[in-house]
Image (tube, helix red, strand yellow):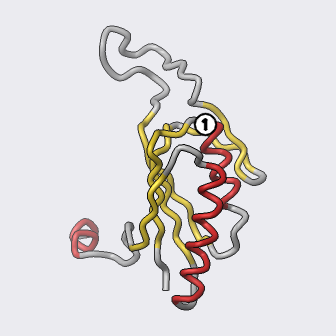
Amino acid sequence: MLPEIRITTKRLLGAESTEKVLNALSALDNIRQITIKGENLPAKINSGPNKGLDNNHPERRMIRFGDKDILLTKLVGDFFLELEVENEDMLSASVEEIDRICKEVIPFGFTMDVGRYSKYRPTLSDYKLRC
């Protein structure tokens, strides 16, 4: 059983807040994968009169996740956590623990949904692309 939890924040998170959330969630044992989604911060400006110039946004920077340094290129609004649980009891315990952690590190609010938000097996489109 590989359910996912989608955490949607009420505001886009900057680099410091994203780092806090990721490090707090990484302490849990049964999280298999964490995927983030949000507003892109490109290295170069893509349009307008300054097209092609460097985008010196203060939130596009390196963050520390566990023992790795990662370049954060987004203002994060969604976290997708893939859980590795055996049964419904483990799932509900994990959801409660994740909710408790999020209430500590996301002070301005969030919503949390349990479901399946990414593909976990090939679809017909995947087979067509290989031909």
Which residue is situated farthest in the bottom direction here?
87
> Could you say which is closer to the camera, residue 53 or residue 83?
83
Q: Above or below — where is 131 with respect to 105? A: below
Q: Residue at x 72, y 44 (%)?
A: 64
The mark tally for this picture is 1
- The local crowd at label 1, few if under 14, some if 14 to 19, many if 20 or more residues have their Cα within 10 Å, is many
Q: Quadrant of residue 96?
A: bottom right
Q: Above or below — where is 69 with respect to 56? A: below
Q: Residue at x 44, y 57 (%)?
A: 111
Query: In this rendering, would 19 be left or right of 37?
Result: right
Kind of element beneath mark 1? helix
> Could you say which is closer to the camera, residue 91 or residue 103?
103
Q: What amino acid is labelled 1 in the image?
A: Ala
Q: Above or below — where is 18 with respect to 41? A: below
Which residue is situated farthest in the right direction here?
67
Which residue is situated farthest in the top direction here?
49
- Point out residue 14 in the picture as x, y percentages from the top left corner: 56, 35
Q: Above or below — where is 70 with respect to 31? A: above
Query: In this rendering, would 25 be left or right of 121?
Result: right
- Point out residue 40 in the picture as x, y percentages from the top left corner: 43, 36
Q: Residue at x 53, y 39 (%)?
A: 13
Q: Quadrant of the C terminus?
A: bottom left
- Point out residue 56 in the picture as x, y percentages from the top left corner: 54, 18
Q: Residue at x 43, y 43 (%)?
A: 38
Location of mark 1 (residue): 15
